[in-house]
Image (cartoon, helix red, strand yellow):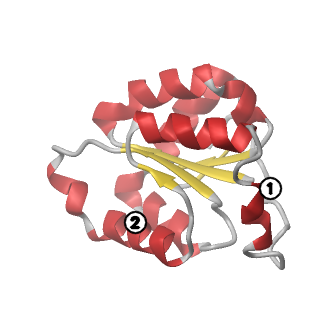
């Protein structure tokens, strides 16, 4: 399964701690991320991460553009108090998740539930939603 990971600047450390704790589960999946988050994640965990541009430079749009083939689960560590939380690219990402029934977390509690569910096979039904899309993304190690 492809897991997209995004984090606002004020939540990057939390995202790194979370991904380090759940690196075992993440390592059995394809991880994609926005640029800065992806570089930090690859460095902190050693996981292979396919990185896009930084979120502020269009990374959210790049992840959204491959919909629904690229992301089957989204972990978005967002700061609800951040002024840009309502940006059109972020709203578009949330809308696309709703349209394509892609599980998305916007906080650490939901991220934990989704990853634990993924690990237990609770999300295996997702593979049948888009059966024609099974080709994994190329995974790049480290430098994003």
Residue density around tag 1, few if under 14, some if 14–19, many if 20 or more, within 10 Å: few
Camera-side residue of 92 and 41: 92
Q: Are marks 2 and 1 in contact (CB under 8 Å)?
A: no
Select label 2 or label 1 by which is in front: 2
Which element is circle 1 on? loop
Q: Residue at x 80, y 74 (%)?
A: 133
Which element is circle 2 on? helix
User: Disc 2 or 1, which lies upstream in sequence?
Assistant: 2
Q: Quadrant of residue 118?
A: top right
Residue density around tag 2, few if under 14, some if 14–19, many if 20 or more, within 10 Å: some
Question: Is residue 88 left or right of 139 when viewed as pictured?
Answer: left
Camera-side residue of 84 and 129: 129
Specify the quadrant that holds the C terminus. Answer: top right
Rendered position, 81 above or below 65 = above
Q: Residue at x 83, y 79 (%)?
A: 132
For mark 1, what is the residue? Answer: 138
In the rendered image, residue 96, in percent from the top left (x then y), is placed at 47, 74
Camera-side residue of 67 and 36: 67
User: Can the viewer see residue 53?
Assistant: no
Q: How far apart are labels 2 and 1 at the CA level?
A: 24 Å
Query: What label sits on residue 94 in the rendered view?
Result: 2
Q: Residue at x 49, y 21 (%)?
A: 17
């Amino acid at each position: 399964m492809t897991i997209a990971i995004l984090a606002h600047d004020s939540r990057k450390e939390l995202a790194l701690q979370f991904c380090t704790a759940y690196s075992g589960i993440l390592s059995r999946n394809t991880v994609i991320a926005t640029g800065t988050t992806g570089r930090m994640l690859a460095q902190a965990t050693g996981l292979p991460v396919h990185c896009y541009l930084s979120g502020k430079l269009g990374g959210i749009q790049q992840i959204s553009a491959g919909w629904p083939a690229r992301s089957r689960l989204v972990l978005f560590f967002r700061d609800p108090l951040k002024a840009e939380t309502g940006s059109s690219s972020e709203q578009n990402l949330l809308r696309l998740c709703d349209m394509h029934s892609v599980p998305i977390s916007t906080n650490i509690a939901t991220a934990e539930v989704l990853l634990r569910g993924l690990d237990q096979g609770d999300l295996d039904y997702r593979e049948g939603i888009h059966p024609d899309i099974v080709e994994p993304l190329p995974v790049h190690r480290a430098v994003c």
